[in-house]
Image (cartoon, rainbow, N blue to C red):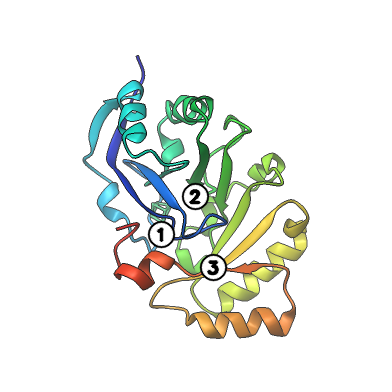
Amino acid sequence: MSRLRITEIFYSLQGETRTVGLPTVFVRLTGCPLRCGYCDTAYAFHGGNWIEIDDILKQVAEYGAHYVTVTGGEPLAQKPCLELLERLCDVGYEVSLETSGALDVSGVDQRVVKVVDIKTPGSGEVTKNLFDNLTHILPHDQIKFVICHREDYEWSKNILQQYQLNKSCEVLFSPSAGQQPPGLLADWIIEDRLPVRLQVQLHKYLWGDVPGR
Ligand code: SF4
C-alpha cells in the first residue's frame, strides 16, 4: 500500500493555468527541495500527514469535481506521486501536476497535464532547472516562467526563443506577486509580440495572499 505525505486536500477555484476559474480539488503534497525567494507555500515544506493513496482518492471523490490538481511543495519529490497521478486519471478526472521543473517528469502518466516551471534567475533557483524535461513536454502541457523583474523577462524571452518553447506547448509568463507589476509585464509582451499567455494568479485577486484559499 503506497502512501504520501499530504499538507492539505481542498476544493476551490483554479487560480492559474488553462483551467483558471474552474472548480478544482487540490492535493498538496508536503516537502520541496527548492527554496524560491517568492515561494507562497513555505508552510508545505514540513509537517503534513501520511495518507494512503486509496484514502486520498476517497477524499478527492467527496468533492465531486472534474478537475484535480496535484501540487506542493514539489509533488515529484515523493515517488508514489506517480501512482497517485495514474490512479486519478484512471478514475476519469482531468488531472494536472504543478512541478518546479527541477525533477524528472519522464515517468508522469501521459494523460496528466504537466505545468512545468522554468526557474528564472530572480527565483534564486535557476541552477536547478532540468532542461531534459523539455523532451517530455506534450502539446497539452504548459511551461511557466515566474517573472520577478525586467532581467527575468529578458532571460525568459531568450529561453523561449532558444528552445522554441511555444512550438511544444502553451507558455505562461506570470508576474511574481508584489515584485513585478502585471501591467508592465503585459506591455513588454505586447511590445515584443511574444507568443505567450500572461497569467495572473486569480486566487490572489479574490482572496489575497492565500494559495488556493
Ligand atoms: S518549487 Fe514551488 S514550492 Fe518549492 S520553493 Fe519553489 S515556489 Fe516554493
* Residue 208 drawn at (x, y percent): 30, 71
Residue at 52% x, 46% y: name it.
Answer: 102
Residue at 29% x, 63% y: name it.
Answer: 210
Q: Earlier in the sequence, mark 3 or mark 1?
A: 1
The relative height of residue 2 versus residue 116 in the rendered view (above or below) is above
Name the residue that disc number 3 marks. 199
Which of these two is toward me, 173 or 68? 68
- Circle 2 Cα neighbour tier, 10 Å, few/some/many (<14 / 14–19 / ≥20): many
**Residue 197 figure quarter:** bottom right
* Residue 51 drawn at (x, y percent): 27, 27
Name the residue that disc number 2 marks. 100
- Whether pointer 1 and pointer 2 mark residues with C-beta atoms closer than 8 Å, the reply is yes
Q: Which of marks 1 and 2 is nearer the N terminus?
A: 1
Quick check: is the Cβ at mark 1 less than 8 Å away from ligand 1? yes
Quick check: is the Cβ at mark 3 less than 8 Å away from ligand 1? no
Quick check: is the Cβ at mark 2 less than 8 Å away from ligand 1? yes
Which of these two is toward me, 54 or 119? 54
Asked which secondary structure carries label 3, the reply is loop
